[in-house]
Image (tube, rainbow, N blue to C red):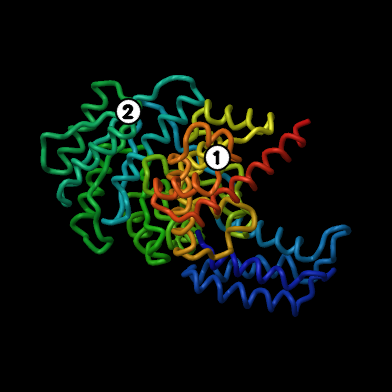
Amino acid sequence: MFERITEAFRAAVDKFRGKRRLVAQDVEGMCSRLQEALYDADVPHAVVTTFLEKVRDRTIGQEGIEGVHAEEQVLKIVYDVICDILGRTSVNVLQVGDAPCVYLIAGLQGSGKTTTIGKLALWMRREWQQTRQKQLKILCGSVDFQRPAAVEQLQIVAAQAGSDFYRAQHTDPIAASEEIFRYAKHHHYDILLLDTAGRLHTESGLLEELKAIDARIQPAHRLLVVDGMIGQESLEVAQTFHRTISLTGGIITKLDSGARAGVTLGFRMIVQRPIMFIGMGETIDDLELFVPERMARRLIGEGDLATLLERATIRIEAAERNRMEQVIKNGSFTFDDFALQLRMVRKMGSLRSLVSYLPGMGGKGMSDQELAAGEQGMGKFEAMINSMTRKERIIPKLLNNSRKKRIAQGAGVTVAEVNELLRAFEQTQQFAKLMKNHHR
């Protein structure tokens, strides 16, 4: 995510390595490089100007801080400015007042709006269960009669999220929205997530329809789903929607792919509304609460281990986590443990979505080919382990040449690839032993 701009941030800051004072000439050189990177990432001009002004104000003429290197000081300044641009705090989006609490979801066609509603329903249900220790009753409904099968799609994703779905009898979007609202109220739902038709910001008729729906059901939240790959053009769309229904926030999707930083860095300043969630993948649980400070750390290449830990807690079952903890404590490590480790990594998401969470990895710019090779390699490793006998998985020393050939044939790989698996296993085994000593 945002590999190029992260790399540019790190390269600009590295110019201060070994220096003790932040002088104007060095700061201007850094700002020039940052300006080029920000424009290349499709960040709006107003945001770039504000960003650079804040960086200059906080760096030029600053004395070195005792014990702090200049590059660390600059990195902290850039981090603080990004936080200012993004907003300092995340928004409490899960507010259940008068039932049902209505969330009106809008956006362009192709932004991932309907899928995002399923993700949002699942996030809300889990968050409520974790914080309140009770179930949240959620209803999903659709008045998107423009796109073929849109209603059916929402019905499917609602079921995946463990939420209820109601199909309106009316085919007029305004009447259907009132029908769905009445159903939610009569059946005492805590939350109603209402999907509206994807529309262009230039379609005045559809925007008036959206405005009428908003007036009839008076939602507590009006969330705009925005495609992160489009860049600052999405912000023009967001402004039009905001003028129409007064948005309460945005959800940025597709940040696991070739997303441009423009919409993420510019949304709050241009639209004057917070980003509430970001979509980091295609599966039903690939939605994260937007935490500005964490996003700022990822943008400067410092990673986001807190979110990565939260993702692991959600996706990896407690029994699996406990087993891996025992492996580390005991220092023992078999191929069964290695296979479990691979499955745990897969549950965390794609490699592309994971690298930005790791310190120092956000700006490495790993190619799609490298990431695809890594995904394929994990799949091959699992196939090879599955081709082993129970005894071979427990006692790797048994793997002589004839056994390796049998495993290679069973997994559809070469003996060289089996040897590669053994090297990776031995490295991980050594790490487990080191961690055991650390726990003593």
Residue 79, image quadrant? bottom right
Q: Position of residue 68 (x, y in %)?
A: 83, 59
Q: Residue at x 51, y 39 (%)?
A: 339
Amino acid found under the numbered disc labelled 2: Pro
From the viewer's perspective, is residue 20 above or below residue 326?
below
Residue bearing mark 1? 338
Residue 100 image label: 2
Gap in Å between the C-alphas at discs 1 and 2?
47 Å
Tell me if I can see residue 280 in this picture: no
From the viewer's perspective, is residue 58 above or below residue 344?
below
Q: Residue at x 34, y 61 (%)?
A: 237
How many other residues sit within 10 Å of disc 2, few (<14), some (14-19) or many (≥20)? many
From the viewer's perspective, is residue 225 above or below residue 166?
below
Q: Residue at x 58, y 67 (%)?
A: 50
SS category of the residue bearing label 1: helix
Quarter that holds the C terminus: top right
Q: Is residue 11 left or right of residue 337?
A: right
Amino acid found under the numbered disc labelled 1: Phe
Give 240 or 62, whichever is nearer the viewer: 62
Q: Position of residue 98 (x, y in %)?
A: 36, 26
From the viewer's perspective, is residue 54 above or below residue 248?
below
Q: Is residue 271 left or right of residue 47?
A: left
Q: Position of residue 95 (x, y in %)?
A: 44, 32
Tell me if I can see residue 57 in this picture: yes
Return the disc, 1 or 2, that comes first in the chain's sequence. Answer: 2
Q: Is residue 117 left or right of residue 199?
A: right
Q: Position of residue 37 (x, y in %)?
A: 55, 72
SS category of the residue bearing label 2: loop
Q: Residue at x 17, y 32 (%)?
A: 179
Q: Nearer the viewer, mark 1 or mark 2?
A: 1
